[in-house]
Amino acid sequence: MGLQTSNVIIQVNGKAHTLVAGSTIEQLIEQLGMQGQRVAVEHNQDVIPRSEYPHVALKSGDRVEIIRAIGGG
Amino acid sequence: MSKQDLLTIAGRDFQSRLLVGTGKYQDMAQTGEAIRASGAEIVTVAIRRTNIGQNADEENLLDVIPPDEFTILPNTAGCYTAADAVRVCRLARELLNGHTLVKLEVLGDEKTLYPDVPATLEAAEQLINDGFEVMVYTSDDPIAAQRLEQMGCVAVMPLASPIGSGLGVQNHYNLMTIIENANVPIIVDAGVGTASDAAVAMELGCDGVLMNTAIAAAKNPVLMASAMRKGIEAGREAFLAGRMPRRRFASASSPLEGTFWQSGS
């Protein structure tokens, strides 16, 4: 990634996660190997539609939740 | 049974009056097999964090119960505040591509898992204003049930007894009152333990029964799913048929005329 790269630390599902500064939600999902999976994303408690993933850049301290459906009554 | 006896919720028609959960099964294969054996068309799921960095190939529940085959009913299980329940529903709507039918439950405490009715009313109002179609878990309080209906919930789902207790219908008379008052489907949600409990709920005139543990915690969940399907159908038919009146003393089934012996009173 060249010379400039600085990192940011965000919280993903409650755990610290390091990303290259300027990464988007789309890039985060790719980095986690979750592309195409049935998940939904919340960014600082706002639900982010799938179509917005490439347009939301993550900043230090952001809180991201990636959720899915599991067994339940 | 007549194919015309449909369960209609928020304009959608269903043949099955059994709604099932997907929790507590051994594995995904058993989940899928039991749900198919139950004949249920409406299937509840919980919304939780993904496991980051683990089991990337882990099977997704929505592949086992595909949303194009089943009506997926995301629940707010585990929420103790209205705000948390609303947050879960908004994420579920995104997860399921704009699907607005949800099962709202706002719990009061861990011991009883009884609903917090004031918080449930608050969450229902916010969700309805946000365009959700709310099927709501509530207590067997007829006034609470009426308030939730008046507010615009598409189905009201009183408990038969505490979630996961298997104690069956504990308050027949309250359920009867709730059913008599209602203009939306009344679905018993929680407390059923075995097929006869499901039949009892249906005989009271409930429109359906939602259950999870009674199937998943049976020794043979797939067989119990099949039993529940039959219990629901039997109870529904008995309700439609109209049971005989109860009487305290006997009434002979065989004619009294034409006997050719002398004994008897």
Image (cartoon, rainbow, N blue to C red):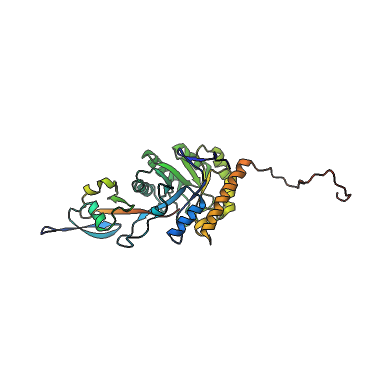
Residue positioned most to the left: A3
What residue is shown at x 24% (from left), y 53% (from top)?
Answer: A62
Determine whether, in the image, residue A34 is placed left or right of residue B103. Answer: left
Q: Quadrant of residue A4?
A: bottom left
Please give the name of the residue rendered at 57% of the width and 53% of the height, measured from the top-left corner: B195
Which residue does the image show at 52% across and 38% down from the upper left?
B182
- Quarter placement of the N terminus of chain B: top right
Outermost right residue: B262
Of B26 and B182, the residue lying toward us: B26
**Residue at x-position 45% and y-position 62%:** B26
Q: Determine if residue B186 is in view.
A: yes
Count up the numbered dots. Answer: 0
Percent across and percent down for residue A24 are 21, 52
The percent position of residue B144, horizontal first and vertical second, equals 49, 42
Q: Is residue B112 visible?
A: no
Q: Position of residue A66 (x, y in %)?
A: 31, 54
Q: Quadrant of residue B246?
A: top right
**B125 sits to left or right of B221:** left
Nearest to the observer: residue B72 or residue B157: B72
Considering only vertical position in the picture, is B256 above or below B225?
A: above
